[in-house]
Image (cartoon, rainbow, N blue to C red):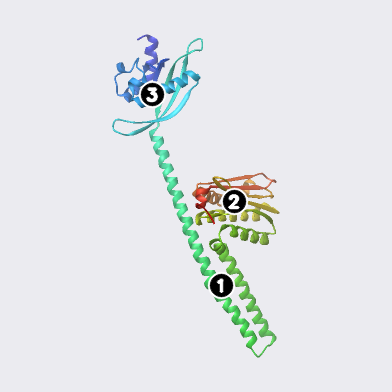
Amino acid sequence: MGKDDELQKAILNNIPDQAWLKDKDSRYILVNEAFIAACRLPESEILHKTPADVWPEEWGNKYIDTDKRVMEQGERLRYEEWRHTEDGTLRWYDTIKTPIRNEQGEVIGTTGISRDITDRKMAEQELLASRTQLRELSAYLQVVREEERTRISRELHDELGQALTAIRIGLSVIETQHEMHDDEWLKSLAGLKKIADSTVESVQRIAADLRPLILDELGLLPAIDWLLETFSETSAITYELSLPATPLDFSREASTAIFRILQESLTNISRHSQATLVVVALKETKDFITMKITDNGSGIDSSVSRQNSLGLLGMRERALMLGGKLRIQSRTGSGTSVELRIPKTSAALAGERK
């Protein structure tokens, strides 16, 4: 071994990662100690051999193919790979291969380095698992909250609403049956009737805000129409609505997610946008259901964005729970566009039509 080779080997051995040099025929001409340890072969059985001679057949053929790519393209190649050790442990590696050129610029071989990234991969997988668990927990909590909202809404509507209506009717009966119709008495009675009427309206509004019965009884599309009409009446913002000609049979989860995202968007518009028009379009394509909400308001500035961060996060989480995405585009002074896209398989019950 010449001095140059000894120097190169000394340099390679100071690299903790697996490192090697190959000629144009993919034969190893220099390897470091980390590489030898990974191969579990003596150096004499590695040098002047190809990967097919050193590694199991599947790995060896892959390494030869990547060598050819590097030499043919003359460019560095980086990729991740995994291998099972002799005891069955799975190890991940970040591998970089680079072409070696002579003084004329011709590719005469390759050099490579492979770093063990198993610990990083395991950490990534644990983080992904944690995120998945958190998302599943969030989805479960969303379902529980919607069920509780439904229960409270029905109790308000059915029990408290009926009781208040009975009180209102009773006051009317008393008013017609009382013989002494002095002004003070009539004024007090009229005040009580007004309070009863106002309370009935408040109960109906609170029940609808918790979860509108129309969403469960008539479905998503009538609920969207009702929501926009109510929004327009309370905010004085006009709206345009476009719905599919042949509506899908939305699942309860999809109906709730789409409705809540629209509801949150309209709340943000009424509070911050100074818009005069909202356009809502629900469309069906071959594979997706999309809903786009566009306003002509002032757009989202940084301060409003911070204030609404939790609301926007909740909207994104609802989309992710259905395997979809939420895209928000806004420019100051040019309005805001919120686009929801979810797979049709997640939006409908087996894609069946009503």
Tell me the kind of residue under disc 2.
Gln
* Left or right: 219 in relation to 120: right
User: In terms of secondary structure, where does tag 1 sit?
Assistant: helix
Amino acid at pointer 3: Asn
How far apart in space, not on screen, are marks 1 and 2 (Cα)?
35 Å
Residue 180 horizontal side relative to residue 256, left or right: right
For label 3, the SS is helix
Badge 2: residue crowd in 10 Å (few <14, some 14–19, many ≥20): few
Tag 1 residue: 161
**Of 134 and 85, which appears nearest the observer?**
85
**Depicted 220 relative to depicted 317: above or below:** below
Alpha-carbon span between mark 3 and mark 2: 56 Å
Q: Report the mark closest to the observer, 1 or 3.
A: 3
How many neighbours does mark 1 have within 10 angstroms: few (below 14), some (14-19), or many (20 or more)?
many
Q: CA distance from mark 1 to mark 3?
A: 75 Å
Please report the residue visible at 63 percent of the width from the left and 88 percent of the height from the top. Answer: 177
Q: Sequence-wise, which precedes: disc 1 or disc 2?
A: 1
| Quarter that holds the C terminus | bottom right
Q: Point out which mark residue 54 bears.
A: none
Q: Earlier in the sequence, mark 3 or mark 2?
A: 3
Mark 2: secondary structure: helix
Q: Position of residue 263 (x, y in %)?
A: 59, 56
| Viewer-nearest residue: 333 or 324 | 324
Q: Is residue 186 above or below residue 10?
A: below
Residue type at numbered disc 1: Gly
Left or right of 311? Residue 130 is left
Q: Which residue is mark 2?
A: 307
Query: In percent of the image, x 39 and y 13: which residue is there?
Result: 7
Where residue 61 is drawn, which disc sits there? 3
